[in-house]
Image: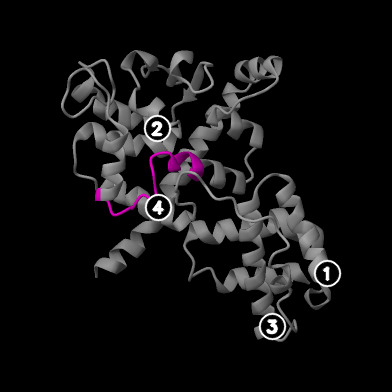
Amino acid sequence: TFTAITDEWLVTKKQSLTAATWQRDHDLLYRWVIPYIGNRPIATIDAPALLDALKRIEAKNLPETAHRTREICGRVFRYAIATGRAGRDITADLRGALAPRVTKNFAAITEPAKVGELLRAIDGYDGQPATAAALKLAPYVFVRPGELRAAEWLEFTLDDDEPTWRIPAERMKMREPHIVPLSRQALAILLELQPVTSHDRYVFPAIGGGGRPLSENTLNGALRRLGYPSNQMTPHGFRSIASTLLNERGVNPDLIELQLAHAERNKVRAAYNRAQRLAERRVMMQDWANYLDSLRADALPQRLLAES
C-alpha cells in the first residue's frame, strides 16, 4: 500500500534529512495524502486519485503546500519503482494540473532546514544591538516590519505571568489594535535589550539617534550583511515563513490569520475572535517559538560540517 511504502521511505530518509525536514515530509503525507489513498496498493494508484487528494490542499488556499506535497509523493513513488513495487511515477502526469505557485511580493525562505540556517546566521550578527535584537525577535512575533521597527517600550508588559505586546490601532495596517503573546524566547530577547534602549521611547532606536526608530533599510542591510540578497529574504519574509510553516504543521488557520492581523470582514466575528482566542494564540506562539529553536538546533551539524 501507499502507506507501507511511505513508512519504508521515511525510514530510509531518517539519517539523510534534517529532523525538521523529515517531520515536515511525514506530516504532509500523513495529513493530506494517506487518509485518501494510503490503503491502496501503490501500483494501482492513478494520477486522478492523487490529484483529488492534492486538490484538497488547494481548496485550503495553500498552493505552495500542494506543490510541495506532490514533490514528496514523487519521491515515494520513485522509491517504490526502485524497490520493484511500482512501475512509474504518476506525479509526472500532474505537472500543470495544480494551480501555479503564488509569486510572493516579499522574498522569504520557507524550507525548514534553510530557516534553521537563517536563524543561526542571525544569532551570529555582530552589528548594533538594537538591529540584532530586532532581527532575533522578528521570527518569533512575525508582525509587519513597520510594526516591529516602531515598537515602543510602553506597549509591552514584560513583568507578568503572561507577557504581552499590545500594538495600538494607529500603528496597525488594518487600524485595529493587535495583541502579540510573547513566548519565553521573545521575552528573553526583550529583557536582554531593555537595559540598552529602555531610556529611549523606541525599543529599536535608530543608530544615529534623533528620536527615530530603526529604518527598513537598516534591517534590509543587516540581512544583506548576513549573506541573504533581497530576492531571497526580506524583513517582511518572516511573516511568510510563519504563515507557510504554521499551515504546513496543521495549526488552526483561523489562529494563524488572527496572529498575522489579517482583515476580518465580519466585525462581530473579529471582535469575538480577539476576545476569545487569545489563550489559544498564546499556546500557538510558544509552540512556534519552540519549533524555531528546533530548526536552529538542526542547522548546527550542517554549519559545523561546512566549517570543517
CA–CA distance in space, label 1 to label 3: 16 Å
**Which sits earlier in the primary sequence, circle 4 or circle 3?**
3
Element type at mark 4 = loop
Q: Which mark, by number, is residue 40?
A: 1
Image spot of residue 163 (x, y percent): 42, 21
Crowd class of label 3 (few under 14; some 14 to 19; many from 20; radius 10 Å): some
Q: Which residue is mark 3?
A: 81
Q: What stretch of residues is rendered in magenta?
A: 225-241
Q: Amino acid at mark 3?
A: Ile
Q: Amino acid at mark 1?
A: Arg
Of tags 3 and 2, the one toward the viewer is: 2
Q: Is residue 256 above or below residue 198?
A: below
Element type at mark 1 = loop
In the picture, measured across the screen, residue 174 lies left or right of residue 201, that is right
Q: Nearer the viewer, residue 11 or 46?
A: 46
CA–CA distance in space, label 1 to label 4: 42 Å
Of tags 4 and 3, the one toward the viewer is: 4
* Residue appearing at x 30%, y 38% in the figure: 219
Q: Quadrant of the C terminus?
A: bottom left
